[in-house]
Amino acid sequence: MSQAKKQDTVKVHYTGKLTTGEVFDTSLQREPLEFVVGAGMMIQGFDAAVEGMSLNEKKTINIAPDQAYGEVRQELMQKVPREHLPEDMQPEVGQTLVAQSPDGRETHVVVAQVSEDHIVVDANHPLAGKELVFEIELVSIEGN
């Protein structure tokens, strides 16, 4: 039986959930996800789980934050004085904003707090600090 190994191009169907059971992503209503095993295209825990799987095998795995999107980093939380915001802006917690760094790069941030004189924006990945649960089915292996 064929097993997925490093440098193989694989296709998987998956459902990603939080430990609460809330689904944050799934491929079940679209084409399977294609990637090269071990090429760094996927989060570490997902990549490692697929390596060694057999064709048509299904498994459920839990991935700790350090093997997924990392822990929440406080240095990615920033206090922004209200005077630096557009005058007509009414920020709300959970709102996504686009921030521009001094070198011109754009970053998506989420409003984490709102007060009278400032807001706090969060540039962490939305899944940072969370344990993830994936149901994976290996549907194709192409060796290299």
Image (tube, rainbow, N blue to C red):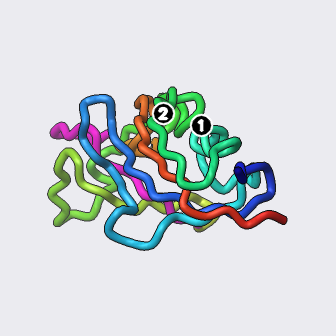
Pair 2/1: label in front: 2
Residue carrying label 1: 45
Give yes or no for contact between labels 2 and 1 (Cβ–Cβ under 8 Å): yes
**The one of 135 and 65 positioned closer to us in this rendering:** 135
Q: Position of residue 120 (x, y in %)?
A: 32, 39
Query: Of the numbered discs in the image, which one, if any, rests on residue 71?
Result: none
Does the magenta segment cover residue 108?
Answer: yes
- Classified by dominant secondary structure, the portion drawn in magenta counts as strand
Disc 2 packing (10 Å; few <14; some 14–19; many ≥20): some
Picture layout, residue 139 above or below residue 71 = below
Residue carrying label 2: 61
**The one of 41 and 71 positioned closer to us in this rendering:** 41
**The one of 100 and 144 positioned closer to us in this rendering:** 144
Q: CA distance from mark 2 to mark 1?
A: 9 Å
Does the magenta segment cover residue 115?
Answer: yes
**The one of 140 and 123 positioned closer to us in this rendering:** 140
Picture layout, residue 129 above or below residue 106 = above
Q: Position of residue 20 (x, y in %)?
A: 25, 30
Q: Position of residue 31 (x, y in %)?
A: 45, 72
Answer left or right for 138 relative to 113: right
- Which residue is found at the position 42% from the left and 35% from the top? 132
Magenta span of residues? 105-120
Q: Which residue is situated farthest in the bottom direction here?
A: 31
Which amino acid type is marked by label 1? Gly
